[in-house]
Amino acid sequence: MVHIKNKAEIERMRAAGKLAAEILQYIEPFVKAGVNTLELNDLCHEYTIKRGATCAPLNYKGFPKSICTSINDVVCHGIPKATDVLKDGDIINIDVTPILNGYHGDTSKTFMVGKVKPEIKKLVADTEKAMWIGIEQVKPGNRVNDISNAIDDFLTANGYGIVRDLMGHGIGKKFHEDPQIPHFRQTRLLTKLEEGMTFTIEPMVNLGAYNVVVSKSDKWTVRTKDGKWSAQFEHTVLVTNKGYEILTLPSQ
């Protein structure tokens, strides 16, 4: 069931989203060759706690860390660790979700480390563009499948694999609420968008095929099945009376 947010809830969502954006801005200068992902995790954790919030991923269904750090062929849910040291040419998606006053703000960004190959740069740029194409479909009366199909039209034409096993999601008091937001073509009508809905748009885009595998050892890390690299961007979006408001937009 989709929960429509009232004015008070929307204000809390704005505050949580603003903090999520601030965390990504804060961590960006630390994303460089030689830094390990546990260091990035600890910095984000401390920043979040100092601002009176908690980290939603920590202990969520057993997840052991405060953020997700997904490098190169890791699609999502990478677990920060001291042995994962960033190298020149890597890409890393950092996904943060603070809980502030009982509400979640969820955002992620793929960062490029040093000099990245041209095809990887294009993957990152096209993934971000795909997210924006999806966001542009958000307005009352449109449906979730309008978001899905617009993203698919762009990415499939450019030869990418769009991950199907993981999707965007409603968000609010709970980390994951209805509706689900697929980023690949849908042949049926999905949920109609209404003012007051909040959800994430977060395409996971592979250089190769869309197929993914989950680590058998840690039960969390999702990788591309063919080993090719993957990128992701994510914003939390509010449906307004005329269109949308991005709740996790960083301040300039």
Image: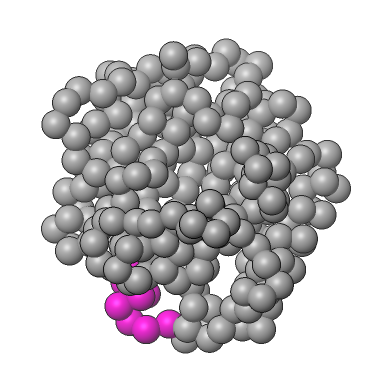
- Tell me the quarter of the image containing the N terminus: top left
| Residue 51 vertical position relative to residue 252 in the rendered view, above or below | above
Is residue 124 in sight in this rendering? no
Residue 190 occupies which quadrant of the picture?
top left
Q: Which residues are magenta?
A: 116-123
Q: Please identify the dominant SS of the magenta region.
A: helix
Residue 236 in percent (x, y) is at 50, 38
Q: Is 183 positioned to the left or the right of 84 in the image?
A: left
Snapshot colouring: one colour
| Residue 38 vertical position relative to residue 89 in the rendered view, above or below | above
| Residue 177 vertical position relative to residue 47 in the rendered view, above or below | above
Residue 108 in percent (x, y) is at 53, 53
Is residue 29 covered in magenta? Answer: no
Numbered disc total: 0
Q: Is 102 positioned to the left or the right of 31 in the image?
A: right
Is residue 48 in sight in this rendering? yes
For image coordinates 17% across by 63% down, the residue present is: 159
For image coordinates 43% across by 82% down, the residue present is: 116
Q: Is 225 positioned to the left or the right of 109 in the image?
A: left
| Residue 117 vertical position relative to residue 170 in the rendered view, above or below | below
- Tell me the quarter of the image containing the C terminus: bottom right
For image coordinates 53% across by 78% down, the residue present is: 113
Residue 238 in percent (x, y) is at 48, 29
The outermost residue toward the front is: 216
Residue 21 in percent (x, y) is at 62, 49
Residue 14 occupies which quadrant of the picture?
top right
For image coordinates 61% across by 59% down, the residue present is: 79
